[in-house]
Image (spheres, rainbow, N blue to C red):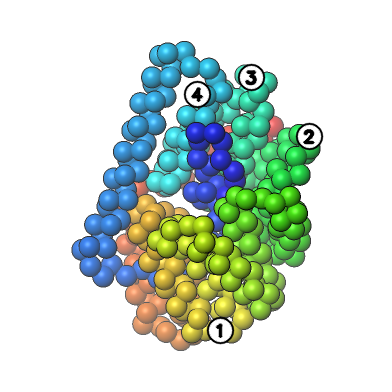
Amino acid sequence: MAQMISSSRSCAQCIRATAWLAGAAVFLLWASSGEALQVTQTNASQQQRVAEDLNMIRAGQQAGMEPLKLGRLWSHLAAEYADAADFLKSEDAYNHALKLFETVPEGSTDFGIVLDNLGSLYLAEGNLNAAESCRRRAMTLRQAAGDKLQIARGESHLAEVSLAKHNFKEATQKASEAYREMLAVEDHDASDLVSTLMTLTYACAMNRQGLEGVIYGREAMALTRSSFAANSMPMGQAKMALGFAEWKAGKMDAAMEDMREGVEILRTSMALGHPYVLGAMVQYRKYLNETHHKREAQQIALEEKKLASLSPVTCPNCTVSVYGLR
């Protein structure tokens, strides 16, 4: 979850949770019409925010707004599209922002942040090489600027790519170094710290260090509780990460409770059919199969199909940004 850019919300806060959350598993129960309404209201509010962003961009273009400010509006729009799982439009909006930032010397910081966010988008799509390319370019810019906090954030973002590529030892090393540096320079952005801790949680659990993963997961959960709302996306992600580590550490009852709660939170806070919701269902279904809850696992599989059919946008033809490859 990368940092904020002025008026622009970082997409890292939308889709960055960890690459494993996109392949993670969540339990979904469409128990009542009230719950379905909650999801519908979430989607409606996203559409309203997108419409407001588009109006601001049009007004800015007509008024001759300076490129830096206009680029930030495009970046904010891209984050809203990513929230709604409309990855094709999100990528296009990020590319608009990058073109604008590239035209002004003072846009270099924003350029690097958007590259990171574009990398987050490619992680969600499963395009790992493009994600790594974006984030390595962003890291080069951070290193050139010499800001220790920004470099630590870049290291954390690269750890996510290592995690997605199943390089668990490398992911653990990078995320550990990033977390230590964030604490050393007193990073006050909770999203930075929580996402780095979640990367450590998954990486340790997958590297047969389940108990260490639980420790990191509990630390992430404590920080999430003190920094985010109880029904927020970060809370759902933190519960999924902790539940995963508990599962791998043999703490089965706690794992089931945390993952079930995580699913419910993500389902009501994210767009229908979003890859994180679908991916989390896979994680929970695998847990249920492994613990011999076959009937529940079959129900989850059916719900996965139902949600996949309701997905607002798929991204089979998303292009790879030239900014991530050159």
Q: Earlier in the sequence, mark 4 or mark 2?
A: 4
Q: On the image, numbered disc 4 is attached to which residue?
A: 70
Q: Nearer the viewer, residue 248 or 179?
A: 179
- Give above or below for 225 relative to 259: above
Q: Is residue 290 left or right of residue 41?
A: right
Task: Give residue 222's position: percent from left, percent from top.
Answer: 55, 67
Residue at figure coordinates x 51%, y 57% from the top left: 227
Q: Amino acid at mark 2?
A: Ala
Q: Is residue 57 left or right of residue 2?
A: left
Earlier in the chain: of badge 4 and badge 3, it is 4
| Residue neighbourhood size for the residue with mark 1, other residues' Cα within 10 Å, grouped as few (<14), some (14–19), many (≥20) | some
SS at circle 4: helix
Measured Cα–Cα span from mark 1 to mark 4: 50 Å
Residue 141 in picture, x, y percent from top left: 73, 35
Q: CA distance from mark 1 to mark 2?
A: 45 Å
- Residues 9 and 189: in front is 189
Upstream in sequence: badge 3 or badge 1: 3
Marks 4 and 3, Cα distance to the nearest angstrom?
Answer: 12 Å
Residue designated by label 1 = 251
Looking at the rendered structure, which numbered label has been put on residue 104?
3
Query: Quarter of the image holding residue 308?
Result: bottom left
Whether pointer 4 and pointer 3 mark residues with C-beta atoms closer than 8 Å, the reply is: no
**Which residue has dot 2 on it?**
144
Q: Tell me which residue sits at (64%, 69%) in the image.
A: 216
